[in-house]
């Protein structure tokens, strides 16, 4: 009797093994779509298009990879679209800090951080605090002036409360003992115009946004939010070496539904690792855009993303305390 009872279970397990093998052997049978939940021309859009082009040029997959932009809701429109698509591996999307903090910031969101299969993080980009040339040459001088100023200095950025720019401002205020005001703007262009126009004292930028003005001598970078100095701009000091615990990285990776067959998830991790190994990625994309290699595959990436939930909640607590 025991053998008869166990037989169905054995058949299920064996069938499951063959099903997984079949998926691994036949996937992909049609074009795969990477849904970029942000506008064309931005950093996320550029990354996924570079990935798609390298896959095509290096013949890394038997079927094409198509990039589609589905924008709105701070990235939620595109991500929800992928979650509502079949869990067959034919729809991918961005895995960024929004995967961790959006369910906290937007209670109406029905999905959780663990509803995703994290394929790999690909890129790190850091915040650079810049001022108009001729105002300040070093961060300590700005901090000293901010302490003496009868009105608060203002830092411009593109993120709302809880985003990278506002978090970096909060951390700098806490460690430096100042009260720099934060102003959220529509885009990096608006921040740049306000800094160069003298309307605000400083602005937070991705290095790729500020590179032209830095090289032209119109902006001065006072600090970068990385743990170590950037290879592409070694002259910019880190906040940490200046005595301020202002570290924050912006990362970009890819994910798909958590219930996607494991063989398909592994397939994509392998493809992305091959993309990362190409000169087109290392030199043509990372180096040319002053980005850092952020490789973090599979489970390691998932653990990191889940860890960001606690870190974000601690930051929000700090924000509330500073508002009192």
Image (cartoon, rainbow, N blue to C red):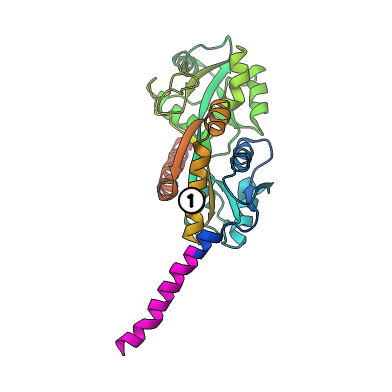
- 187 vs 215: above or below: below
Position of residue 157 relative to residue 83, above or below, is above
Residue 142: image location, x then y, percent: 49, 16
**39 up-or-down from 135: above or below:** below
| Residue 133 image offset from top left, x and y in percent | 58, 12
Residue 160: x percent and y percent?
58, 38
Name the dominant secondary structure of the magenta segment. helix
Foreground: 1 or 298?
Answer: 1
Number of dots carrying numbers: 1
Image quarter of the N terminus: bottom left
Q: Would you say residue 19 sits in the magenta stretch?
A: yes
Q: Farthest bottom residue?
A: 1
Residue 268 lies in the magenta stretch: no
Residue appearing at x 59%, y 14% in the figure? 215
Q: Give the range drawn in magenta.
A: 1-21
Secondary element type, mark 1: strand
Out of 140 and 272, give the one closest to the viewer.
272
As rendered, which of 215 and 225 lies closer to the eye? 215
Q: Can residue 143 be seen in this view?
A: yes
Q: Is residue 228 left or right of residue 111?
A: left
Q: Quadrant of residue 82?
A: bottom right
Is 269 on the left or on the right of 197, as rendered? Answer: left
Residue that numbered label 1 is attached to = 118
Q: Residue at left 39%, top 25%?
A: 240
Looking at the rendering, which quadrant does residue 239 occupy?
top left
Q: Is residue 52 left or right of residue 170?
A: right
Q: Can residue 260 be seen in this view?
A: no
Residue lying at the far top in this picture: please name it.
134
Packing grade of label 1 (10 A; few <14, some 14-19, many >=20) is many
* Residue 152 percent coordinates (x, y): 54, 23
Vertical comparison of 92 with 225: above or below? below
Q: Which of 113 and 197 is in front in this view?
A: 113
């Amino acid at each position: 009797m025991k053998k008869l009872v166990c037989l169905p279970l054995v058949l299920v397990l064996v069938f499951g093994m063959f099903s997984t093998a079949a998926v691994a052997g036949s996937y992909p049978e049609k074009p795969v779509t990477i849904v970029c939940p942000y506008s064309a021309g931005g950093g996320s859009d550029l990354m996924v298009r570079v990935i798609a082009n390298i896959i095509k040029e290096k013949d890394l997959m038997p079927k094409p990879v198509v990039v589609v932009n589905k924008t709105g809701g701070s990235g939620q429109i595109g991500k929800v679209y992928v979650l509502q698509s079949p869990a067959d591996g034919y729809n991918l999307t961005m895995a960024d800090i929004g995967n961790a903090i959006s369910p906290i910031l937007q209670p109406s969101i029905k999905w959780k951080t663990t509803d995703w299969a994290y394929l790999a993080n690909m890129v790190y980009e850091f915040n650079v605090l810049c001022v108009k040339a001729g105002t300040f040459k070093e961060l300590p001088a700005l901090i000293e002036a901010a302490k003496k100023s009868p009105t608060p200095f203002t830092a411009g950025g593109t993120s709302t409360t809880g985003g990278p720019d506002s978090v970096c401002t909060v951390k700098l205020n806490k460690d430096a003992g100042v009260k720099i005001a934060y102003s959220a703007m529509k885009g990096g262009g608006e921040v740049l115009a306000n800094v160069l126009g003298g309307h605000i004292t400083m602005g937070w930028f991705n290095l790729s946004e500020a590179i032209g003005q830095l090289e032209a001598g119109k902006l001065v970078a006072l600090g970068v939010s990385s743990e170590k100095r950037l290879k592409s701009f070694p002259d910019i000091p880190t906040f940490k070496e200046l005595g301020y615990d202002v570290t924050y990285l912006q990362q970009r990776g890819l994910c798909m539904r958590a219930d996607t067959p494991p063989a398909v998830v592994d397939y994509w991790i392998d493809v992305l690792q091959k993309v990362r190994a190409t000169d087109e990625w290392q030199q043509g994309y990372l180096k040319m855009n002053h980005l850092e290699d952020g490789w973090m595959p599979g489970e390691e990436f998932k653990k990191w993303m889940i860890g960001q939930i606690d870190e974000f909640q601690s930051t929000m607590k700090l924000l509330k305390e500073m508002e009192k």
